[in-house]
Each structure stands twice: as structure tokens, then as C-alpha cells.
Image (tube, rainbow, N blue to C red):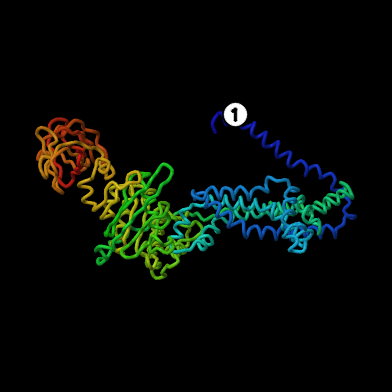
Amino acid sequence: MTPQATRGAPVLLLLGLLLALYLLAPFAASVPFLFDADWHGADLAGILSATLVSVAAATTSTLLVTLGGVPLGFLLARADRARPRALFWRGIGLGVQLPLALPPLSSGVLLLFLIGYASPLGRLSGGRLTDSFVGIVLAEAFVSAPFLIVAARSAFRSLDPALLDVAATLGHAPAIVFRRVALPLCARGILAGAVLAWLRGFGEFGATAMVAYHPYSLPVFTYLAFGTEGLPAMLPVIAPTLLAALAALALLLGLERARPSWAVPAPADPAPLAAAPAGAAAGPAPALILRAGRQLDGFALAVEWRSTARRLAVLGASGSGKTMTLRVLAGLEPGAVRIGARDLGCLPPQERPLAYVPQSFGLFPHLPVGRQIAFAADSDPTLARHWSERLGLDALSGRRPDALSLGQQQRVALARALSRRDTRLLLLDEPFSALDATLRRRLGRDLLALQAETGLRTILVTHDPEEAMLLADELLLLDRGRVLQSGPVAALFARPVSEQAARLLGAVATARGVAIGPDRIAIGADVALRVSGAPLRPGPVGWAVRPYQLRVGPEGDYPATLLERGDAFDGQRRLRIRLGDAELDALADPDCPRPGLCRVSIDPEAIQVWSAG
């Protein structure tokens, strides 16, 4: 704690204890009257009857409220992210909480307008909706429903939306996603809301007295007893209320303390995958055609893309629209998608032949590994067993996600995706972003082996150009929602369309020159670089080369000047070199020359060139 927080702690403690004292004081004040109460003269039959009525009515109203309140809480939570309908749902959310702000007697008056003797519903029912057990249930449901709705909405709002998206892309309809994912993960919060709603209904007096004075509920019976017998007779009457409240609060405490204890020490990651067998499909795939356009606050996405490659990557900086593009392909955002002759744009996500692996892997916290892998609606048991064994997950089948390392979580997500019968497209959103460098390289090689083994078309979203070079044959470069460039990896790396594209492709330091031939760039008075690739047009160009691709040695092709020689680290030195008019970084062995004149070599294929005219 900060010094300011420490100094303020006694004040906070005092304020909290004062309120706690006030809330507990009435219970303490009743203790001396326990022995003075008329326990033998109490109307035990009336108390028992009123208690049973209140328990039955509170239970019935809570069941009814739960039946509609849980779906409503789910819809309200989901609507918080649905901007076009936000105003409508905001009104619904506000309206269903109004009973919280109303005095109970006012709630009863409003209900009489709806179900009283003179109302259309009252006349239609012959007056059976008031002064009856049904009336008690309706009154308690009206005043207690907001407690459950608010609790359910809060529970569903805290749910990671990626889990619902993944379940949909694994072939499950919305109702199944709700039942198998949302409901189990939010059950404790919903049950806590149901307990609060039961307590509110059990103790309701005002609305009940207005709508259904008979049969007596326990609060109404308590009021009558106080009016006829006075305070000494009240302890036997309120005893059932106290017992019911204590039981419900004990249940709440149990829910709070019953946190799932799934985590156990994560075992080491399984061994790297063996090399993929030969013979996997490597030829062109059916043409993938994508058109996506979204307009959000401060951001616009406009993407058109066509490719027949099997290994694709979407490369861009954070906020460029990469993930949104992937979500369009998955059917989680609107857009036109076609694969060959098949139009996917009109299909919901659960009907598309694909599997989606979000950045967080999207594993369901309540399911063990075995059930995760078999979760898809069209999961093939044979494929599930194959990929579980192939990815080294057999020994982990009983573990839940929080007992797995990040590498194991990624393998589970891949096994689940590959276990679908009809998967034609594997969508991977930044699959290595949460991993350290060593594990990232290892799992990248694993994914490369899986690509070769399955022949599946994969689309990888990444901000790392090295991942894109390793795992993709074609690239889509995005910048602020717009396509900068698309095409084969080698072509884009050799000829980025602009300096911005070159930087996205990994160029750190850029330089200027003049194309003086189809494969020559003049970068100074006496230096003309030789480049490969498509012939250059004469004129100003930009160019870049990575530090590890520039070699210093006495047999180098170009004269240069070594300006700085850094300290040796990890078997290399970082150098600063002037080549023509450009100053570049380079990496060299620790025993490289000292500052002064030197010579350098650059592979022509390593030089990126773009028009600067």
C-alpha cells in the first residue's frame, strides 16, 4: 500500500465497522427478549402455514424468474457489444430494473393495474390472479426478478466472448453454445442471483399485501401478529424468517468459497513433432475470395483479396484490421466470402467448413482436454484420437486448461480444430503472441509440419514477418484497415510497394538510391548495388537490408567504412557501417575488423527495393 493509503486505512476501517455494527445491532438487541417471548402461546399452526406459503411462493417465483431471467441476462450482456441495437437493449435493461427503485407498495399498485379485478386480465381470469397463491407468486416475481437479471447479466458479461465465437465456429448453433459453454461457466453467478431473488421474494410484504392479502404469507402474518399481540409475541413469528435467511446466506457463502480447484502443476511440453510425412496436398487450392467492409468509431475496414494458395498470412501492425478480417472469414463479422464455387458469406459461423483458433486459444475452462478435442459438432472420434496422439496430448486428457502450459494449450486448440470431419480452412489469430521466443520457434516448426501433413488451407494473422515467411506462401499486408499489398511472400519481400510495406515486412533501417538499370541501384558516388527480382524502372527508389544479411570481410563486393564496433554479445557484435550515402546496422563475428575502411557483401536477393518517386 502507498503511504497515503496506509494513513487512510484506520478511517476506512472505522467507517466499515460502524456500518457492520449498525446492521448487526438489531440482532444483538433481540437476544435479551428470547426468554421473555411467549413461545407456548404462539400460533404455531398459523406460523407453519404462513412459512410454507412463503417458501412455496418464493421458490415458484424464483423458478419462473430464472426461466426467463437467465436468457434475458444473456441477451443484455451480448447486446452490450451490438452497437446498432444498443439503444433498444439499453432501454430494456433499464426497464427491467425499475422495480428495484419502486417502493414495494407502489409495485403492488402497478400490478393491480395489470391483474386486478377491474383489469382486462383480471376479468378474463375471473379474479383468480389476486388474493390467491398465484397473486403472491406474481407479486414476488415482479420485485425479485431484477436481482437475478442483474446477476446473470454481470456473469455473462464477464465471460470471454472468444469462447462463444470458437464454439460457434466448431459447428454449434447459438442455443447449444448457450447451454454447453455460457451456462456452465456462469452457473455460480446465476445461482447467487437466484438465491438473492428467493430471499427478496420470501421477505416481500408491500407488493404481496396489495395484490394477495390471502393466503397469509409469512411477512403478512408477521404484520398481523404485531398489530394484534405486540412486540413480545414477535420472536416466534420471525424465527422462520431468520432461519431461512441464514440458510440462504450459508448457500451464498458456499458458492463464494467453492472456487473450482482445477489447477495442478503443468507438466513439461510434449516433444516436438516429427517431420511431416510426404504426400500432403501442396497444389493450388480453390480460389478464396474475400470482400470485407466495416465502419466503426474511428476505424474503417476495406479489404478485397483473392488467392489460390494453401498457406496464407495476414500481416500488419496492431489495429490494422487483421483480426477483424479473420473474423469475417469465420462468419463472426459480416462480409462476402467465397471458396471456389461455394458462397460462405450467407452462412452462419456454425455452418462454415472451418476451424477458428483465437489469440487466447479459446479453450473452455470447465472442460478437460479429452472433451475439448471432441467438442466440435462434427468431431470425428478417429481424428480426435489421431491428433491427440500425434500432438502428444494422450497423457493430458483429464486435465483442464489452467493445468496446461501455453504450448500445451495451443496444441489442444489445434487438435480440436483438426478433429472436425469437414474442416477446409484453419484460421489462426496470432497463435504465438503469448509465447516466449524459444517456444515460439518450436511451435512454429510444429505448425509447419502440420501444414505439410494435413494439406489444409491455413490463414495466419500475425505482426511478425518471420512467422509469415515461415508459415505462408502468400501475404496480405494491412495498414489501418486498407490493403497495402498482396501476393507471393518472395515477391512482396523483394519488392514492397512502399516504405511502410517494407517496415511491416521487417525492414528496420531504410535508405534511398537511384535505379540506374534493371538490376542496379546507385547509392553513392562509387557504389552501385546489384539486386535481383523484377526489373527496376529508372528513378528514385528506397531500399533496405536486414543486419544479419550484410557481411563484413576483405573479399566483400562493396567498399564501406566501419563507423562503430559494439560489444560482443551472444557470439556477435553489432556494427554501424556507412555504405555509399547510407548508414546501416550489421552483425558480425566478435573478431571483426576495428573501425575504419572495410568491404561488405550483400546477397542481391536480400535487398528489398520499392519506388520512391
**Residue name at image x 85 percent, y 58 percent:** 44
Left or right of 218 in this view: 156: left
Left or right of 531 in this view: 137: right
Residue 392 appears in the picture as rendered: no
Query: Quarter of the image holding residue 50?
Result: bottom right
Residue 96 appears in the picture as rendered: yes
User: Vertical placement of 499 versus 384: above or below?
Assistant: above
Residue 66 pos. (x, y %): 63, 58
User: Vertical placement of 14 versus 366: above or below?
Assistant: above
Residue 252 pos. (x, y %): 65, 52
Q: Amino acid at mark 1?
A: Arg
Give the farthest residue toward the bottom.
Answer: 382
**Residue name at image x 89 percent, y 55 percent:** 40
Quadrant in the picture for the N terminus: top right
Determine which residue is flagged by label 1. 7
Observer-nearest residue: 579 or 476? 476
User: Callout 1: 10 Å neighbours few (<14), some, many (20+)?
Assistant: few
Left or right of 14 in this view: 528: left
Quadrant in the picture for the C terminus: top left
Left or right of 390 in this view: 500: left
**Residue name at image x 36 percent, y 51 percent:** 432
Residue 209 pos. (x, y %): 79, 53
Q: How many marks?
A: 1
Residue 519 pos. (x, y %): 11, 44
Secondary structure of the residue carrying tag 1 is helix
